[in-house]
């Protein structure tokens, strides 16, 4: 006989070891109070005539007292609209017999359909970080209209979520899905992780015509919602190519105009990758000038910093300086230590971020939960050698003298990035360990190389495992246009990965993309990021509590985007919802077999529409472009 799940045990015998020590049904917020009854009646009538805009306003207005202060302020406009509608509501009380005392239960019962969706009896973890509770969640149209004990009330679709977790849909703050979402609109690899919103355009790479991109997204829609950062590297390249030079005044003015137009079209901020070209060719002053363009829109600055290894403290200081000088919030992308020689440096980086926050800079960060990262082979060659693009690089390495200089620089980079502090390149065993840290992810010129480490490639070629040969191999791979490799991070218990994940201002994010199932050898994070946290780091290792982990995937990233109607389970919120089995949720994708969907995600709703139902992907595309919410202006924590 199978042992009861942790959730089942907790439901019958709650304890402090449970996901929540509070297991009680609460009364639904929408049906409390005489004033709410009038609004609820109006909701029912609006529902009957199909006016979902009115439903949105009414459902928020009816529950305004339950909205936290930050939310109240941003909903002022909707409340003002509702005040102007009060005569209409009074008329409804006269026109509809008995409506002054009618509850939400009465009208749907007479109509026979009730809610659109009713999720019953699940452990509702609302995204706030507070303990969950067993209760019900009801949806009409795009919005959550009731949270509480709704037993016996009718609905078109009823989901029995007993022994399951109900939470807001996950918001991925760091995605590169803009590269494939127009082709793979369903984004199945993300939907099966419980993700309902993807922030694209990270690491300085994005469409530069945001209005056109959003227009193509809207019809016929997407599975998840899509938000977009305008990428500095793409903007720079569109204006001045891949030249390693400062922009002229005219070129800088053109870049500013593109950034400004992107924000007007709905972008949420500016992203950079200062580690790769062409972003790496930009000065701090150039980034400050462009970041100032997003200030009037309330956007934020997201950065793949100039260095994540031996010079990470300098790179972090540059990011904070950009925030101070431009007056924008700073978001550090995929925070990690990528050089083995300085593993443990997150103690200093997180301390400096804390100090910056205390000094008034709004700083946040994100992280993917893996022991290895992913990046182009440009990580291991000097950026100057890549100026002008791949053809220019090939011409440089065709010159024996210039090739020697480049290979020597690659050797130096490998020593700093792959050897730990107590390891030496003169020790063959240390060199074997170091070169085994690098795995080829995608090699279109020779797919047989995909998934192999540098050690394995050298061994197959019967070449000696030396630092020099490893450097020569990397230069060869760059020349062939290899686009991705993986390198080991410090995921030992209590070290860098754990430390960053536990930091209160860290959101969980994939740094992944969407693509054809089975194509290439991508990082497994594109298939497993969020379930990996829930399964490995919450259930197995207990590094995070369930409520904390969900907060890092929902309300915390929503706050970064200034969203007041997403990221929480509250009445009036957009019904982006995920239902999962906390006992079985897990990632299945590995570095050798990355094209494997996660398990344990049962239902996913985007704006009240099922995109995953009973583990089966639907053909619905309710996802739409989403812009900034109502963040505070300027640089405030």
Image: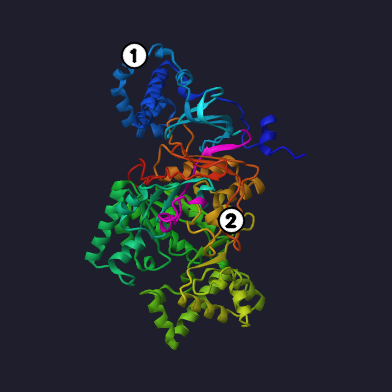
Residue lying furthest bottom: 400
Q: Which mark is residue 231?
A: none
Name the quadrant of the N terminus. top right
Residue 543 is at least partly visible in this image:
no
Residue 42 is left or right of residue 608, and the answer is: left
Residue at image coords 32%, 61%: 235
Residue 237 is left or right of residue 418, and the answer is: left
Q: CA distance from mark 1 to mark 2?
A: 57 Å
The picture places residue 160, in percent across and down from the top left corner, at 59, 32
Q: Residues within 10 Å of mark 1 (few under 14, many from 20)?
A: few
Residue 2 is at least partly visible in this image:
yes
Lower sequence index among marks 1 and 2: 1
The picture places residue 548, in percent across and down from the top left corner, at 56, 42
Specify the segment rendered in magenta. Answer: 162-188
Residue at image coords 74%, 39%: 3
Residue 399 lies, with reference to residue 601, above or below; the image says below
Mark 2 = which residue? Answer: 596
Residue 595 lies, with reference to residue 482, above or below; the image says above
Query: Is residue 186 on the magenta stretch?
Result: yes
Label 1 element class: helix
Quadrant assignment, res 246:
bottom left
Residue 578 is left or right of residue 73, and the answer is: right
Quadrant assignment, res 317:
bottom left
Mark 1 = which residue? Answer: 95
Residue at image coords 40%, 14%: 99
């Amino acid at each position: 006989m199978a042992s009861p799940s942790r959730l089942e045990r907790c439901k019958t015998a709650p304890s402090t070891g449970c996901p929540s020590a509070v297991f009680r049904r609460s009364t639904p917020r929408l049906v409390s109070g005489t004033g709410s009854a009038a609004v609820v009646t109006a909701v029912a009538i609006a529902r009957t005539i199909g006016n979902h805009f009115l439903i949105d306003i009414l459902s928020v207005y009816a529950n305004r007292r339950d909205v936290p202060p930050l939310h109240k302020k941003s909903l002022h406009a909707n409340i003002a609209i509702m005040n102007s509608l009060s005569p209409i509501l009074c008329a409804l009380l006269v026109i509809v017999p008995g409506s002054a005392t009618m509850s939400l239960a009465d009208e749907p019962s007479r109509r026979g359909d009730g809610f659109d969706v009713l999720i019953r009896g699940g452990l509702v973890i609302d995204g706030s970080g507070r303990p969950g509770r067993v209760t019900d969640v009801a949806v009409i149209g795009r919005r959550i209209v009731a949270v509480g004990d709704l037993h016996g009330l009718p609905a078109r679709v009823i989901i029995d979520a007993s022994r399951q977790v109900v939470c807001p849909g996950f918001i991925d703050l760091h995605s590169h899905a803009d590269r494939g979402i127009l082709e793979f609109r369903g984004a199945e690899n993300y939907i099966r992780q419980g993700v309902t919103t993807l922030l694209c355009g990270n690491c300085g790479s994005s469409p530069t015509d945001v209005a056109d991109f959003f227009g193509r997204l809207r019809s016929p829609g997407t599975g998840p919602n899509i938000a977009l950062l305008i990428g500095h590297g793409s903007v720079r390249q569109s204006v001045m190519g891949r030249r390693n030079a400062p922009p002229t005044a005219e070129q800088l003015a053109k870049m500013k105009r593109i950034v400004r137009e992107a924000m007007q079209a709905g972008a949420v901020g500016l992203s950079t990758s200062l580690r790769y070209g062409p972003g790496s060719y930009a000065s701090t002053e150039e980034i400050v000038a462009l970041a100032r363009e997003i200030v009037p829109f309330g956007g934020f600055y997201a950065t793949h910093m100039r260095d994540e290894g031996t010079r990470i403290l300098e790179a972090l200081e540059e990011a904070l300086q950009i925030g101070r000088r431009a007056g924008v919030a700073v978001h550090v992308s995929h925070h990690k230590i990528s050089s083995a020689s300085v593993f443990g440096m997150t103690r200093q980086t997180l301390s400096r971020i804390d100090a910056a926050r205390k000094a008034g800079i709004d700083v946040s960060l994100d992280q993917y939960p893996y022991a290895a990262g992913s990046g182009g082979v440009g990580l291991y060659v000097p950026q100057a050698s890549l100026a002008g693009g791949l053809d220019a690089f090939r011409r440089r390495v065709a010159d024996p003298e210039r090739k020697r200089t480049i290979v020597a620089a690659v050797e130096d980079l490998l020593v700093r990035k792959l050897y730990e502090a107590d390891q030496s390149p003169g020790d063959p065993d240390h060199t074997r360990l170091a070169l085994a840290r690098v795995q080829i992810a995608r090699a279109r010129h020779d797919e047989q190389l995909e998934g192999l480490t540098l050690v394995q490639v050298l061994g197959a070629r019967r070449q000696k495992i030396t630092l020099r040969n490893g450097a020569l191999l990397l230069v060869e791979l760059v020349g062939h246009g290899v686009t991705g490799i993986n390198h080991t991070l410090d995921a030992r218990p209590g070290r860098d990965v754990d430390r960053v994940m536990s930091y209160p201002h860290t959101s969980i994010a994939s740094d992944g993309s969407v693509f054809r199932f089975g194509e290439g050898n991508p990082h497994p994070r594109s298939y497993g990021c969020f379930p990996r946290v829930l399964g490995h780091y919450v259930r197995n290792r207990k590094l995070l509590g369930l409520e904390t982990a969900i907060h890092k995937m929902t309300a915390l990233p929503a706050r970064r985007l200034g969203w007041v109607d997403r990221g929480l389970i509250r009445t009036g919120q957009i019904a982006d919802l995920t239902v999962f089995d906390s006992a079985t949720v897990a990632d299945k994708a590995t570095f050798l077999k990355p094209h494997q969907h996660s398990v344990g995600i049962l239902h996913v709703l985007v704006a009240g529409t099922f995109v995953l139902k009973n583990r089966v992907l639907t053909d619905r595309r309710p996802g739409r472009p989403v812009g900034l919410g109502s963040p505070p202006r300027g640089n405030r924590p």
